[in-house]
Image: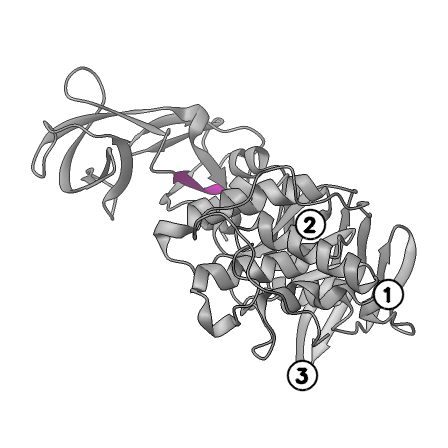
Amino acid sequence: MAELQSAPRPGRPAGQWGPRGTAGVSIAAALTFEDVHVSIGDRHILKGVTLPLVPGEIVCLLGESGSGKSTMLRVAAGIQRIEKGEVRVNGTLVSSAGYHMEPQRRGVGLMFQDFALFPHMTALQNAAFGLSDLGRREALAQARVALKRVGLGDRETSYPHMLSGGQQQRLALARTFAPRPGILMLDEPFSSLDARLRETVRNETLAILRETRATTLIVTHDPEEAMVLGDRIALLRDGRIVQVDTAAEIYRKPADLGAARFFSPLTEISAQVMGGVVETPLGKMTVEGRADGAQVVVAVRPLGALDVVTKGEGIPGRVVSKREALGVDLFEVQVAGVDEPIHLRRRSDINLKPGSDIMLRLNAEHVLVFDPD
C-alpha cells in the first residue's frame, strides 16, 4: 500500500490522545480454548489450557516469563499451531490437531510486544496495513480515525524511527484496532514504557478497548496491571491455568500459596492446627476444614492483616527499616518468633522511625492459610 501517503494534517499537540468515544466499534466475538496443548521442540509449553471468553470481555493472562502467556495469544491469532485440543471463535473451529485456519480469516488483531512496525512505511501506511479489503478512500479514512484517536493525527507521514517509544506503542495500538477486529490480543503492551508514561498510556488503552467493545486478551507479568485492566484474570503457571476469576476474588481467595505469592509479598509462618486453632507469634486464629496436627502456612500480606498501634494490647515489634513512597510507609518490623522481618504498608507517619517500638494487632479475616507447597 505504498500509495497511502498524505500531507500532514492538523492534529492535537504531541503526547495528547484523541477524543474518547471515537475509536470505532467492533462486533465482539467469543473465543474458547479447550484442552489446548502446544510443544515447541522438546518443550511442552501449554499443557491442557481451557479458557472461555465471552464477547466483549477483557481477560488478562498473568504469569511469570515462560508460563505460556504469549503462546496463548499466538495460538488464538493463528501464528502457532496446536497439537491437541480446540480453539473456536464464535463457535467456529479455527485450530485443532488436524485443522488450522489462516490468521487473516480469524478476525483477530495482535499487537506484538516489540510493536513489529514496518520501518519502511509511514504511520498512515502502518495504520492502514490491515485494511486492504477496503477501498483506498475508506482505508485511508479508517486509518486516520485510528491515528487521531491515539494522538498521532499530525504524524501521518512520520516513519517509526521518527517516533518516540511511547508514540510507537500508540501507532502499534492504532494498527491493531483500525480494522475493527472482533478479538484483540495485546502482548505486554506497556513493558517498554517508563513509569511516567505507563499509567496514562494504560488508562487510555483501556478506554480504547472499551470503546471498540472487542473481546480482548492482554498478556502481562504485572499483577497490579492485570487487576486494573482485566474483567477477569487467568493466572498461568508452567503451561497450566491455576486460577481464573475477577481481580477481587483472585486476590481475596488465591488458589494456593504460589498464587498468593504472585499477587503480594508475604510473611509466611509455619504452624500446626490443634483444636481448629493455630498459634503463631502474631496471635491465635481459627482454621476451618483441617484436622488436628495438620501443618499449614499462615500467610500475612503487607496490607490489611496487621494493624500498627503505638500503645494498647497487641504483639510487640520493632521497626527495623522504613521507606517512604508517595504518602505510604514501607516498613520492616521484627517480631520475636518470626525468622524474617515482617513487611508492612501503611499511611505515612513521621513519628514511626527505625528503632520505634510498636504493637501489632492481627486481623484474622485478612490472613491467608494454605497447605505447605
Contact? badges 1 and 2 (CB < 8 Å): no
What's the residue at 87%, 68% (across, down)? 96
What's the residue at 44%, 45% (across, down)? 200
Residue 361 horizontal side relative to residue 223, left or right: left
> Looking at the image, which residue sits at the far front?
7
Element class at badge 2: strand
Name the amino acid, label 2: Thr
Element class at badge 1: helix
Q: Which residue is mark 2?
A: 216
Q: Which residue is mark 3?
A: 42
Q: Mark 1 or mark 3: which comes first in sequence?
A: 3
Give the image location of residue 28, x and y in percent: 79, 45
Q: Which residue is mark 1?
A: 105
Q: Mark 1 or mark 2: which comes first in sequence?
A: 1
Give the image location of residue 43, x and y in percent: 65, 78
Residue 295 horizontal side relative to residue 269, left or right: right
Residue 6 horizontal side relative to residue 361, left or right: right
Q: Which label lies toward us, 3 or 2? A: 2
Which is nearer the eye, 347 or 289? 347
Q: Which label lies toward us, 1 or 3? A: 1
> Looking at the image, which residue sits at the far left?
355
Q: Which residues are magenta?
A: 295-300
Q: Mark 3 or mark 2: which comes first in sequence?
A: 3
Which is nearer the eye, 65 or 306? 65
